[in-house]
Amino acid sequence: MKLLEERILKDGTVLGKDVLKVDNFLNHQIDPVLMQELGNAFADYFADRNITKILTVETSGIAPAVFAGLALGVPVVFARKHKSLTLTDNLYCASVYSFTKNTTNEIAISKNFLSSEDHVLLIDDFLANGQAATGLIDICQQAEASIAGIGIVIEKSFQRGRQELEAQGFDILSLARIRAFENGIVQFVEEEGS
Ligand code: 5GP
């Protein structure tokens, strides 16, 4: 998606050899106009898949997921990373290793909001090694919900997430695909027809 690529080039900062900071429009300050465009792009691609629910992980998956939910007319559920006083039992849980924080989090979704009737679109802000997506897939499997596909805002294609998820048969739409960071400059995967 050209609009997103341009925004990454304008406002993204490369940290070290494999982390992109996009605090200006996605991970801290949020640009709602851009988020709506992203949500619409997910909704267009997955429009005819009979999706009943969108699943994401707090915090940064929520904004694009909500706009996709608005466009598809379905609810959005976010997995919680932190223990909550009001969310104590009746949970589906999975362990997720965080690539950027170097810690393992339990993520949890209430059993009230996911069931075997659901056909789910998974959405997240970044795809690196696929740990967050794998945690959400694990939770869907516990609930016996089926998975329609995976929508990612920014994929770092030089990490192994896409390859591993595709090998399991998942359809992935990434709105920006980063091939490499070269001298601190983001290089995108050349898409056919772009
Ligand atoms: P994965 O689980 O695919 O290894 O990593 C994806 C998760 O880690 C995302 O939910 C995101 O929060 C975080 N993440 C991974 N790589 C980056 C990155 O380069 N920049 C930022 N801001 N977050 C990242």
Image (cartoon, rainbow, N blue to C red):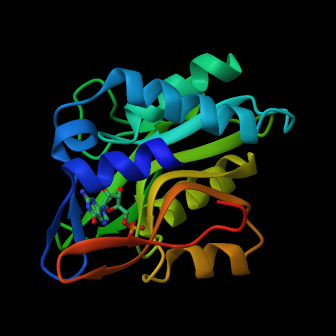
Please provide percent x and percent y for residue 17: 19, 83
Position above or below: 135 against 97: above
Residue 106, image x, y percentages: 32, 57
Q: Residue at x 24, y 73 (%)?
A: 185
Can you say which quadrant of the picture contains the C terminus?
bottom right
Q: Nearer the viewer, residue 39 or 61?
A: 39
Percent position of residue 41, x then y? 62, 36
Q: Is residue 79 left or right of residue 186?
A: right
Q: Quadrant of residue 19?
A: bottom left
Which quadrant does ligand 1 occupy? Answer: bottom left
Q: Is residue 154 left or right of residue 142?
A: left
Q: Position of residue 14 (x, y in %)?
A: 17, 68
**Is residue 19 placed above or below 25 in the rendered structure?**
below
Q: Indicate left or right for 87 with 159 as reference.
A: left
Name which residue lies at 53% across and 66% down: 134
State the residue in front, 73 or 42. Answer: 42
Quarter residue 57 falls in: top left
**Residue at left offset 29%, top offset 27%:** 31
Q: Is residue 182 above or below residue 116?
A: below
Residue at x 52% of width, y 53% of height: 152
In which quarter of the view is residue 62 placed? top left
> For this rendering, which residue is in front, 27 or 89?
27
Q: Is residue 158 visible?
A: yes
Looking at this rendering, what residue extends furthest in the left direction? 16
Q: How many marks?
A: 0
